[in-house]
Image: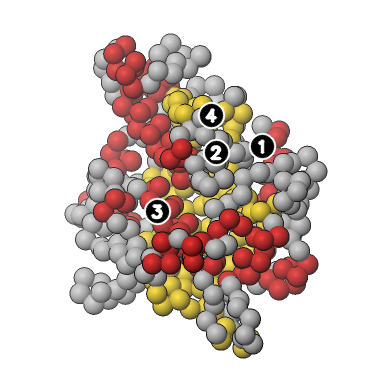
Amino acid sequence: MRRLQVISAALNTHCHNDSITLIRPSSSSAKTSNMISSSPLRLWGAENFQYEESPHPSTSLRIPGLTHESFDRDWNPKMTSIMQTSSIARVYAFHTPLPPTSGNEKQTGKTRFFLDWPRLTQEFFTFVSSSEFVMSRALYKKSLKKWPLDMKFTLAHIGTCSIASTSEFFACPDGKTSTASELLWSNTNQFVTVDRATRKATRLPDWYLERYKGKGYMDRGLVVKPFERPAATYAHPSVVQWTDTDNYNHTNWASYVRWATDALHAAIFLQNSGTGASSTRSYSPYQAPNLVSAEESARSALHGITRDIVARGLRKLHISYLRECLQGERVETHVWQDRGGERELVYFSVVRDGEDVCQMKMWYFDALPEEEDDDYPV
């Protein structure tokens, strides 16, 4: 845990990084500098790309939105799809040239990009240290169209060696079922600049700090504090597959959330299981060393979460990325709740060789009043 505290302090406050090696570049780092022109993303169909310098640097655009593959069996948008949509939209906004006239500066033949991202990521890697997603109840309205979507992407905070940005996604008004944009979800990410040679967190360049420091809408960066993993957890095994990785061969940011979701559903399944060894062997070959069986492990780890609560939809997600995972490595996703804590709050830790590589907290929606619950997925 001491190492987690050191990493959290270095990434979220000041750039004290002498003992910290970070080698997980983000998906919008240098390798994506030509993504728009060299991939099908140039045919994505995004439109209405605009830029504003004040009150805070921001871009806005309309994107195709979710697809029929974005929904789970409850017809709720999958968190992994929300994350991938957010990531692609962010990459598009970072690597699309700004309009000829942007803010107070007239262009003089020089192409500019939002937050000068291509230039920054040619000099440095960027490491996603933490992420927050906040979902609205509107996201789970089955009567509300989820395509296309309007996105607003805003600078949140500039630290010594970190950049926080927020993207918001809105349902587009269609003049029939809706006449105003409804916020569906927002995503705030904390990026850390990483020296290409040393693979350690490093100070942002002076030119970048002079241009952007103090222009974000947040007083501080995104801080996701580490937490202790208790002895009694349910642990679900996984092997990192090729489909879990990005173009750096690192586990992509959404795969951790998929593992967590599967672990939670497995724990609920086993908690409710009245059968013995057959379901355990088929569903969870892992036996927690401190508990007799997977069923007992699940029952000891969960204290209030149910299948019905999960089906209401995810309200908030916090993620802290601590170390990289590579293809072929074995991991265990631990899931638990605090005894006597919130029924809708679940903790997760992805562990490799005894070390936490990723920590997550998921808050699910509480129940709506009965009179408002007509089209709510329960």
| Category of crowding for the residue at label 3, using alpha-carbon neighbours closer than 10 angstroms: few (below 14), some (14–19), many (at least 20) | many
Taking the view exactly as shown, the residue that stands out farthest to the front is 38
Gap between marks 3 and 1 measured at Cα: 27 Å
Q: Which residue is at 48% across, 33% downward?
A: 240
User: Is any atom of residue 181 visible in this view?
Assistant: yes
Mark 2 or mark 1, earlier in chain: 1
Nearest the viewer among 16 and 246 is 246
Gap between marks 4 and 1 measured at Cα: 21 Å
Q: SS class of the residue under badge 2? A: strand
Residue type marked 2: Gln
Gap between marks 2 and 3 measured at Cα: 19 Å
| Category of crowding for the residue at label 2, using alpha-carbon neighbours closer than 10 angstroms: few (below 14), some (14–19), many (at least 20) | many
Q: Is residue 306 above or below residue 215?
A: above
Gap between marks 4 and 2 measured at Cα: 17 Å
Q: SS class of the residue under badge 3? A: helix
Mark 4 or mark 1, earlier in chain: 1
Q: Badge 4 is on which residue?
A: 329
Residue type marked 4: Glu
Q: Is residue 102 above or below residue 184?
A: below
Q: Badge 3 is on which residue?
A: 82
Left or right of residue 185, residue 164 in this image? right
**In this view, the mark in front (4 or 1):** 4
Nearest the viewer among 30 and 74 is 30
The disc label shown at residue 359, or none: 2
Mark 3 or mark 4, earlier in chain: 3
Mark 2 or mark 3, earlier in chain: 3
